[in-house]
Image: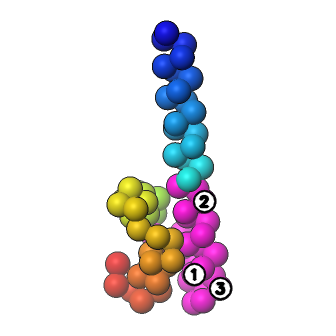
C-alpha cells in the first residue's frame, strides 16, 4: 500500500509541475508577442505560482503584467 501511495504522490507532483510550466510558458509567449517584456525580468516563480494556485488564466496574468497592474 505504501508503494501505491508514493506512486500516486509522484504522479500528482509531476502533473502539477508540468501544468505550472505550461502556464509559465504561455505567459512568456504572450508577453513576448504583445509587448516584448521578458518574464524573468519582471516576476519570479513564487509570484507566478500564486496566480497559478488561484486559477487565473495565463492570458489574464500576461495582460496584468504588461499593464503593470500586478
In this view, the residue in front, 38 or 52, is 52
Disc 1 secondary structure class: helix
How much space separates mark 2 and mark 1, taking CA atoms? 14 Å
**Count of labels in the image:** 3
Q: Which residue is mark 1?
A: 31
Q: Give the residue drawn at x 41%, y 82%.
A: 64
User: Which badge, 2 or 1, comes first in the chain's sequence?
Assistant: 2
Q: Give the residue drawn at x 64%, y 75%.
A: 29
Q: Quadrant of residue 52?
A: bottom left
Q: Quadrant of residue 26?
A: bottom right
Q: Which residues are magenta?
A: 20-43
- Verify CB contact (< 8 Å) between mark 1 and mark 3: yes
55 vs 25, left or right, is: left
Q: Would you say the magenta stretch is mainly helix, strand or loop?
A: helix
Disc 2 secondary structure class: helix
Q: Is residue 1 above or below residue 43?
A: above
Q: Which residue is mark 2?
A: 22
Q: Residue 50 in the image: x percent, y percent?
A: 36, 59
Q: Residue 16 in the image: x percent, y percent?
A: 52, 46
Q: Is residue 14 above or below residue 10?
A: below
Q: Residue 14 in the image: x percent, y percent?
A: 58, 39
Task: Decide: few, some or many residues near mark 1? Use Cα within 10 Å; few <14, some 14-19, many ≥20.
Answer: many
User: Which badge, 2 or 3, comes first in the chain's sequence?
Assistant: 2
Q: Which residue is mark 3?
A: 33
In this view, the residue in front, 11 or 44, is 11
Task: Decide: few, some or many residues near mark 3? Use Cα within 10 Å; few <14, some 14-19, many ≥20.
Answer: few
Q: Give the residue drawn at x 55%, y 64%.
A: 24
In magenta stretch: residue 35? yes
| Closer mark to the observer between disc 2 and disc 3 | 2
Task: Decide: few, some or many residues near mark 2? Use Cα within 10 Å; few <14, some 14-19, many ≥20.
Answer: few
- Verify CB contact (< 8 Å) between mark 2 and mark 1: no
In magenta stretch: residue 57? no
Amino acid at each position: 500500500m505504501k508503494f501505491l501511495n508514493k506512486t500516486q504522490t509522484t504522479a500528482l507532483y509531476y502533473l502539477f509541475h508540468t501544468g505550472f510550466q505550461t502556464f509559465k510558458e504561455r505567459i512568456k509567449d504572450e508577453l513576448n508577442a504583445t509587448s516584448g517584456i521578458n518574464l524573468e525580468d519582471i516576476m519570479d516563480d513564487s509570484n507566478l505560482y500564486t496566480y497559478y494556485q488561484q486559477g487565473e488564466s495565463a492570458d489574464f496574468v500576461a495582460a496584468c503584467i504588461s499593464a503593470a497592474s500586478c
